[in-house]
Image (spheres, rainbow, N blue to C red):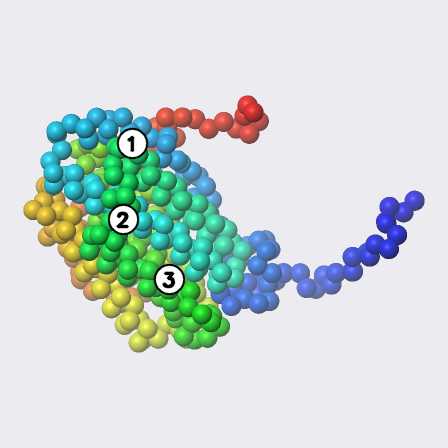
């Protein structure tokens, strides 16, 4: 007996020759492959970054802030040390939102590949977790919420970094923007370099050094632990972004002109000066043995590493004054995060409703 409803149309016979051809996949301007079809994978690096992100899953509320609260309420921290902590909370609290908004509003629409989009969805979630982190820290320490989250309007060195990035987002959000033109492709890659190489690869790292310097001295350990997990996430974000940029360059070699390369070098050099001014503003006369001069050298050092990874020449040839940061970033040497959790996950089968 037929199960079909009278009047119901049978699906048309599908032409199997139209099934996805993996070689037709492209990161931008791909009109021949359905972006909803994840497999077969072409860009296995994108999937690996997604899996690595999933393996690092964490939430800020799993980290105890008790010792931080006690230290913050005490008289053991100097005014200069408190300023460093506050300035970095002020910068990161909105910077993470800027990155998340840029993914959702500017990048995702123009990436025409399913596995790359899969990672972008994961990254957007992680940016939300990072923003949650600063909400958790501000509430735990009973800080003035409006002061912290409004610093990007009130503190010039924070405002200048954020304004630099927001201009890049606005370039993609402009009416009529498309990556189908040569100019549009360059503008899109400029945005990727601005957010992955500059924001997550340069602007975040002075703050990482400052906060982790407290952690190395067994001070503000809850904040320090959360910053370690944020830095671990950001390392994957940076690696994904560099793979994305370099593969778009391979697929669209004409966009990587000498003039465009010089423009990107100039953009990164401008960002380096913004980051150095931010470090000087945070540190003043120095704390915990950290001096502003050391940050000039460090920011130049990491800028050279980022330039080299996207095929551009080093500009500064500085060495790092913080060799311990390289070990901190080495994920294989980090402590097992899952051994430090305050709470434990339940498997789906064990959940009680």
| Quarter assignment of residue 313 | bottom left
Of the 4 image quadrants, the one containing the N terminus is top right
Establish if 253 lies above or below 351. below
Residue wearing tag 3: 169
Q: Quadrant of residue 215?
A: top left
Query: What is the C-alpha distance between the residues marked 2 and 3?
Result: 20 Å
Instruction: Answer left or right for 265 relative to 10.
Output: left
Q: Earlier in the sequence, mark 2 or mark 3?
A: 2
The CA distance from mark 2 to mark 1 is: 18 Å
Q: Residue at x 30, y 34 (%)?
A: 139
Q: Secondary structure at mark 2?
A: loop
Above or below, 203 against 258 in this view is above
* Foreground disc of the pair 2, 1: 2
| Rendered location of residue 6, percent (x, y) | 88, 52
**Viewer-proximal residue, 139 or 214?**
139
Toward the left, the furthest residue is 285
Which residue is denoted by mark 2 in the rendering? 150
Q: Nearer the viewer, mark 2 or mark 3?
A: 2
- Is 250 placed left or right of 147 in the picture? right
Q: Secondary structure at mark 3?
A: helix
- Quarter of the image for residue 231 reads top left
């Amino acid at each position: 007996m037929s199960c079909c409803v009278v009047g119901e149309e049978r699906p048309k016979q599908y032409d199997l020759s139209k099934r996805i051809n993996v070689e037709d996949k492209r990161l931008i301007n791909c009109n021949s492959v359905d972006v909803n079809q994840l497999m077969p994978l072409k860009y296995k690096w994108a999937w690996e970054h997604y899996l690595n992100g999933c393996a690092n899953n964490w939430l800020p509320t799993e980290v105890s802030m008790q010792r931080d609260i006690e230290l913050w309420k005490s008289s053991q921290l100097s005014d200069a040390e408190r300023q460093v902590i506050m300035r970095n909370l002020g910068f990161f609290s909105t910077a993470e939102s800027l990155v998340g908004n840029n993914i959702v509003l500017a990048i995702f629409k123009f990436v025409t590949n399913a596995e790359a989009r899969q990672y972008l969805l994961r990254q957007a979630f992680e940016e939300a977790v990072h923003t949650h982190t600063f909400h958790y820290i501000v509430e735990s320490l009973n800080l003035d919420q409006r002061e912290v989250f409004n610093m990007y309007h009130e503190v010039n060195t924070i405002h200048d970094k954020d304004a630099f990035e927001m201009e890049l987002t606005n370039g993609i959000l402009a009416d009529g923007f498309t990556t189908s033109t040569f100019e549009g492709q360059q503008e899109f890659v400029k945005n990727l370099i601005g957010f992955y190489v500059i924001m997550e690869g340069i602007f975040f790292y002075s703050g990482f050094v400052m906060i982790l310097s407290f952690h190395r001295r067994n001070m503000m350990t809850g904040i320090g632990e959360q910053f370690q997990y944020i830095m671990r996430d950001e390392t994957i974000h940076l690696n994904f972004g560099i793979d994305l940029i370099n593969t778009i360059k391979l697929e669209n070699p004409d966009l990587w002109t000498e003039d465009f390369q010089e423009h990107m070098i100039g953009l990164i050099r401008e960002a380096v000066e913004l980051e150095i001014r931010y470090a000087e503003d945070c540190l003043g006369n120095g704390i915990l043995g950290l001096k502003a001069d050391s940050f000039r050298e460090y920011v130049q050092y990491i800028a050279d590493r980022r330039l080299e990874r996207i095929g551009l020449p080093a500009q500064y040839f500085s060495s790092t004054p913080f060799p311990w940061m390289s070990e901190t970033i080495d994920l294989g040497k980090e402590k097992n995060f899952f051994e430090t959790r305050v709470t434990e996950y339940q498997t789906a089968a064990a959940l009680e409703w």
